[in-house]
Amino acid sequence: MVGNGPPAAGETIVSCRSLSVRYGSVAAVQEISLDIPEHQITAIIGPSGCGKSTLLRACNRMNDFIQNVTTEGQVLYRGEDLYASDIDPVEVRRRIGMVFQKPNPFPKSVFRNVAWGASINGFRGDINELVQRSLKKAALWDEVKDKLDQSGLALSGGQQQRLCIARAIALEPDLILMDEPCSALDPASTARIEDLLFELKARYTIVIVTHNMQQAARVSDWTAFLSHGRLVEFGATEAIFTRPDKRETEDYVTGKFG
Amino acid sequence: MIQAVLFLCALLSVVTTAGIIWVLARETLNFFRQVSAVSFLTGMRWTPLFQPSSFGVLPLVGGTLMIVVGAALVAVPLGLGTGIFLSEYASDRLRGILKPVLEILAGIPTVVYGYFALTFVTPQLGRLFPSIQVFNAASASIVVGVMILPMIASLCDDALRAVPQALRHAGYALGATRFEVSTRVVLPGAFSGVLASFVLALSRAIGETMAVTLAAGATPRLTVNPLESIQTMTAYIVQVSLGDTPAGSMAYLTVYAVGMLLFMITLAMNLVGNRILRHFQEVYE
Amino acid sequence: MTSATAPLGRNLPIRRRLGGLFHAVFLIATFTGVVLLAVLLAEVIQNGIPWLTGSFFTNFPSRFPDQAGIRAALWGTIWLIGLTALFSIPVGVGAAIYLEEYAGRSWFNTLIEINIANLAGTPSIVYGILGLAIFVRWMALGRSVLAGALTMSLLILPVTIIASREALRAVPNSIRLAAFALGATKWQTIRAHVLPAALPGIMTGIILALSRAIGETAPLIMIGALTFVAFTPAGPMDEFTALPIQIFNWASRPQREFYGVAAAGILVLLGVLLTMNAAAIWIRHRSQRSMRW
């Protein structure tokens, strides 16, 4: 299908090759091939039910937890197929971070939230330093540095989401998947997180699913437009929004449907 | 008015509690006119039916405690393990089979468990510990443990399932195994619900009567040896009731005093356990 | 994965093995309960079947094991449960209706709720003491089936209320609102719409509460149900015995042969319970099929 990667590509970090995901008999993602460039922000947009979240979850094998799911095709992370039989999904999820739509910090202290993933995975360095570093990178340190023992749930919505970002960053992933991370937040918090994404881009690759087109236009370098489980078009954000190739893309980004 | 009639029905529950307290308190006070409360609660010899009579209730409390501790040793690990398995590991189909089995286990009358302790558990223990007495605390506490196991399993299962799926996903997304997510994210998140299940189940063990009457014995004795026979508070009350006790006699009064103590202990545990449970349910509303 | 190993994640193999180990541990814990149940049933069946003869059902208790029978106990239980149902069903359902449909969230109603929860966990023998003092002595009902039934009704009242409340709570509010919108009073709504909808759940709860009552021994001992009864009750004021009491009596005998008789009695008791629970499940199943909100 349409697999035109970005014209002047940087290194590709994740490649989907003819990826199809089915829930029982319902096809959520159909034959998608897509190359995600490194150190860039790629947005996945499309109307409700087009398969954006399914595609995102396929990249860190979170779809495995859904009953009756079948995945066909390949997801290549730095050249290795994540769905190969000798690959341990637990390790996949450690190396690829995820931030969810509704902030879901653990009912533990702020400190433990950030430290948990690292300590589970055998971190042996200075955990205090790791927590501080991660919270700083998530632009949350100044607000919580005196409250590290407080419950993560005591923070505001926007702070909780940044806590979840810090938690993911603490594992030093190269790739961070974000599933509509701002849809449950107020505009002020959303703006803060969008600013944060620009800072994170230098060190990480970010793939963000969003139903907010303006956000995609503001934030991302590349945009993939999905419809009915298929990749309709993929290209530089500016091109997708101002001179898209496909009629369907143009209809969607100009708000004619979705 | 219909509403008034229905209200009276609901009020009956309050009347019942008031009745229990009134009935127990009245005769307990009579008892304390003849025996000091201090010697009752701290005395270590319980021979109310013989001469010279002694009314220290600690042997009965000790007997009950032995049963409860033994039952906890059986029911807490097995019940919690079952609850975790049902909630975090078992497929829907397996759950559909296991939950009814647990319900059956919970529905078996206690006298049947007493029979089982007497006819199976004690002989089997006798193979391992030849010095075991025919009536002993160990058999009774094992079957009481099996009796309360389904309660712990079911309540823990409920508590664990109340933890939102989003938290599990958060754990998995950080590269944790199912065991780690279940025990280090979900279980701590369900902690107070799990705790409530322990408290409520142990309260049930304290009030258990028939299994201990049949299998644990009628010898009030302070001991830590589970192979010996003991007597629990509940078994003592049964023992007296099976005999001929004239109203007003000391033996009659001891039933109420012991009953009062039993009621207070289980009431305290129920209040605490239910309070914790309600708090837990509110968190995950 | 072979790409540059980060310092994290080197412990994965151990964690995997630990996870597998505990999976097995949890599985074993679960199946221990199942196995114990199987052993218990096998033991009872093995000991009891030989004694389960026709005469077992028609005989009265006896000092001789082969002449002992369950007739008095069976009829006693039937009388007891019948009367208990008569008292506990209206009161329990009535209380549940009041608490669920009429009561607001006042402190008094919360008190009632806490009270019911505590009563549900109160040892059954305490109910026996209560029954002895109130029904046997104060109301001078003596050691009758009536006193026993009243005591049992109090015992299962909390459980009945809790189960009925859940059944009422499960009825969608839209049904009530629709009836109110048509001008019905609260009671009319409850009687014509809510109660019928909640009925399967309530019936299931009642059956389970009654099956608990059938198995209870301690309160009956307290109020003086006799353990050697050679007659069946002819009226509510008669003395009586019941299945669990008879089993208890047989199991307490020093002669080993009586263990078999007790086992037979247990089989009868379990048979009764199984029938009642099957009825409850059948009702629940049927209602789930026909009820489509």
Image (cartoon, rainbow, N blue to C red):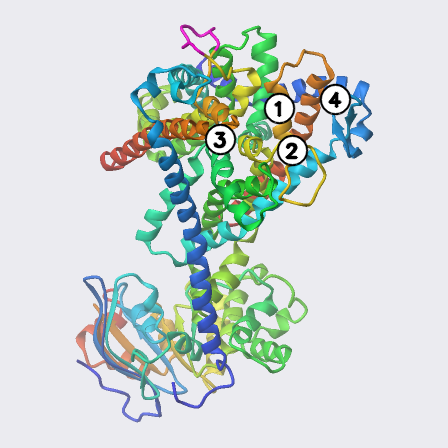
> Relative to A226, does residue A67 appear above or below in the rendering?
above
Q: Nearer the viewer, residue A142 or C283?
A: C283
Report the magenta residues as a range: C230-239
The crowd level at tag 1 (other Cα within 10 Å; few <14, some 14-19, many 20+) is some
**Residue at which label 2 appears:** B231
Q: Mark 3 lies on which chain?
A: B
Q: What residue type is labelled 3?
A: Val
Which numbered disc flags the more N-terminal residue, 1 or 4?
4
Residue B239's tag is 1
Residue matched to label 4: B50
Cα distance, mark 3 to mark 1? 15 Å
Q: Is residue B91 above or below residue C242?
A: below
For the residues bearing labels 3 and 4, Cβ distance under 8 angstroms = no
Q: Which of the 4 image quadrants contains residue A133?
A: bottom right
Which of marks 1 and 2 precedes in the sequence?
Answer: 2
All told, the count of numbered labels is 4
Identify residue type, mark 2: Gln
Question: Is the residue B121 above or below the residue C116 in the image?
Answer: below
Query: In terms of secondary structure, where does tag 1 sit?
Result: helix
**Label 3 CA crowd tier, 10 Å (few <14, some 14–19, many 20+):** many
Chain letter of disc 2? B
Q: Give the x, y percent position of residue B171.
A: 47, 67
Dot 3 or dot 4: first in sequence order is 4
Q: Give the crowd class for mark 4: few <14, some 14-19, many >=20 residues within 10 Å.
A: few
Circles 2 and 1: CB distance less than 8 Å? yes
